[in-house]
Amino acid sequence: MRSRNYDELFIGGRWQAPSTKRRLSVISPHTEESIGETPEASPEDVDRAVTAARKAFDDGPWPRMSVDGRMEKIEKLTAIYTAETDAMADLITAEMGSPKSFSRLGQGTGAVAQMHLNLATAKNFPWVERRPGLFGDVHVRRAPVGVVGAIVPWNVPQFLIMPKLIPALIAGCTVVVKPAPETPLDALWLAEMLDEIDLPDGVVSIIPGGRETGEALVRHPGVDKISFTGSSATGRHIASLCGEQLKRVSLELGGKSAAIILDDADIDHTVNHLKMASLMNNGQACVAQTRILVSERRHDEVVDALAAMMSGLQVGDPADDATDIGPLVAQRQQHRVMGYIEAGVDEGARIVLGGTDKPHDRGWYVQPTLFADATNEMRIAREEIFGPVLTVLKYSDERDAVRIANDSEYGLGGSVWTADVAHGLNIAEQVRTGTFGINMYTLDTTAPFGGFKQSGIGREFGSEGLSEYVELQSTISAGKLPDL
């Protein structure tokens, strides 16, 4: 992959010089060498982007265009992006270590699929409707929420930009995107594509940066809504800042999902599917099924099957098609995950497989690690590790399994594995989590996605995701309103 270097920021739809000389160096987690650089947006750059977005929303043509007119622009972007999906996925693999097979599925193809799905959703969305009211007809219009600040994490960056940027643009909003400092290159390549579709001035800005950049965007009085994906701790901070201004906010936060394996489950099928459901993206996924709940009767069988599966994982160069587990995004993340492994041992859990020995001399790798003899009170069972670490927990009966699954501050994903799908649905209805799988766990981006409890506020994907970017305006008339 060729090195990518940017000297300008994409502010208000134009490439502009940054206000400072601060740079973000993107380090390959496999080679520990630089693969590119971008400017780091300062608060002054944030202000320029929001000011441009505010002017475009208040005075520009974008929110006043027809929905069909805005969708035509998104269709052009989709065509341009589609030609580059594999190259975009490979860039993300180089940036943050996601295995090539996962990147091409989730980052390239997945991002394009979201554009198509958002366009399809918009065609059937009730932008305007008529209702009978107490004093005559009520005209209900779904109006754009305004200037949107979209803050995106590093783990699946393009996949997570799209459910913010695309529905917001279709709704008529203007958008300031802040990608993570670990993955600015793919975001600025997206800016190059946006530059080709001739959006009106001010409609989109892409300004990479870290905490200071994000804080400036959240606090800016010109922003009407913040859409954030990331950790629950940061989400709580953002929610408090938005609350001070009564600013709209949606939050897709952390998870500690439980996979409940019932006694009638096919263990081979279950473990084969948990390879992806639990360890996707090197374990760096908010929906990863990392708490494996199994009865005392089948515990040893499941542990042995998981250990056999995990011992066969290929750990290495993420650009290799055969790689199952690549490096973690940064050295700090490697150290963090190893700290959790040490904590698991200190608290009395048993390492079945893996540990803190580095599998390679170079790169920020962690061995796939499996814990048994753990309890749900341990840190490895309660906190989001964000690495290739699984914890097996015993339950006494199904009621106990549901109790353990719900005994978490998170509620983002979950699954049940059983020969009886109808019974699996009954289990799903008892677990307080936003998404749930029966004999599988894969996101369906036609369905609303989000969390209960500390896993967030609001939903992405489907019509519910589009609804996050509109406000409802009701108009009541003393006379008969014209036909729709």
Image (tube, rainbow, N blue to C red):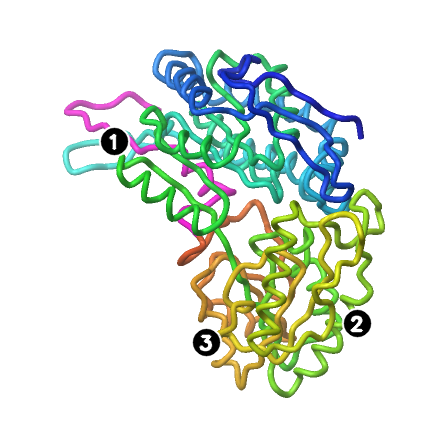
User: Is 396 placed left or right of 454 in the picture?
Assistant: right
Q: Is residue 166 visible?
A: no
- How crowded is the residue under tag 2: few (<14 C-alpha within 10 Å), some, or many (20+)? few
Residues in magenta, as a range: 456-484
> Which one is closest to the eye, mark 1 or mark 2?
2
Is residue 185 positioned above or below 253 on the image?
above
Give the residue type that dot 1 points to. Answer: Ser
Q: CA distance from mark 1 to mark 3?
A: 43 Å
User: Is 98 placed left or right of 13 in the picture?
Assistant: right
Q: CA distance from mark 1 to mark 2?
A: 60 Å
Q: CA distance from mark 2 to mark 3?
A: 28 Å
Q: Are marks 1 and 2 in contact (CB under 8 Å)?
A: no
User: Which quarter of the figure has residue 47?
Assistant: top left
Q: Are marks 2 and 3 in contact (CB under 8 Å)?
A: no
Is residue 96 positioned above or below 404 on the image?
above
> Which one is closest to the eye, mark 2 or mark 3?
2
Give the residue type that dot 3 points to. Answer: Arg
| Quadrant occupied by the C terminus | top left
Q: Which mark is residue 441?
A: none
Q: Depth check: 216 or 444 in front?
A: 216
Say if the magenta span includes residue 59: no
Coordinates of residue 334 in the picture (x, y in percent): 65, 53
Point 41% across, 15% down: residue: 56
Residue labelled with disc 3: 403
Residue labelled with disc 2: 308
Q: Depth check: 146 or 454 in front?
A: 454
Residue labelled with disc 1: 474
Query: Considering only order in the chain, which callout, 2 or 1, is on the residue closer to the N terminus?
Result: 2
How many numbered marks have been drawn onto this rendered protein structure? 3
User: Which quarter of the figure has residue 217?
Assistant: top left
User: Which quarter of the figure has residue 141?
Assistant: top left
Give the residue type that dot 2 points to. Answer: Ala
